[in-house]
Amino acid sequence: MADSNFVYLTKERLLELEKELTELKTFGRQKIAEKIAEARSHGDLSENAEYDAAKEEQGLFELRISKLENMLSRVRVIDTSNLPQDQVHILSRVTVKNLKNSNTYEYLLVSPEEADFQAGKISITSPVGQGLMGKKLGDKVSVKAPAGMLEFEILSIKQNQH
């Protein structure tokens, strides 16, 4: 199996996804079955929009379960203990200063599957994430992003240990 097929997650995110999958397979499937049974009880299935909607919801639901199972079968838990502590890498919490407007930002670099910009988690495959990877404290970084050229200075690097 090629390395690119692996899905890198933190232990916490792996546990969250396993819990979601368990809930979907138990309570979720039960709720969908109840909706289908309810809609079926309303009579003629050929003109029953509620039944059609419930069956479509079931299909989307099973697709989510399938995607989770596929992802979880390829998971590798990230171990940062052997990575350099003075460089930016996955799971580094990096504070940067935008050199154009002097605003500071704090990012946690994560795998694409865990990225959540609103929560300050950026993917190591994003333009900013790629630009920061391997850099050290005080380094200046130029990043070509969809919004144009961004220039940052690295103010701090903290390593999250998982």
Image (spheres, rainbow, N blue to C red):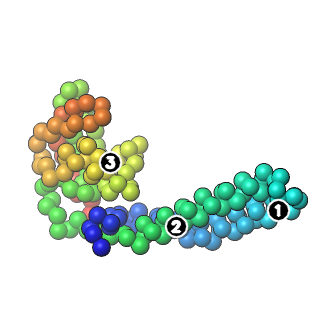
Residue drawn at the location 37% of the way across and 70% of the way down = 74
Q: Nearer the viewer, mark 3 or mark 1?
A: 1
Q: Which residue is mark 2?
A: 66
Q: Amino acid at mark 2?
A: Ser
Q: How many marks?
A: 3
Q: Residue furthest top?
A: 101
Residue drawn at the location 22% of the way across and 36% of the way down = 144
43 lies left or right of 159: right
Above or below, 64 against 134 in this view is below
Above or below, 78 against 109 in this view is below
Task: Point out residue 50 in the picture as x, y percentages from the top left corner.
Answer: 78, 53
Query: Which element is circle 1 on?
Result: helix
Q: Amino acid at mark 3?
A: Ile
Task: Point out residue 9 in the picture as x, y percentages from the top left corner.
Answer: 35, 63
Query: Which element is circle 2 on?
Result: helix
Asked whether 80 or 52 is in front, the reply is: 52
Q: Amino acid at mark 1?
A: Arg
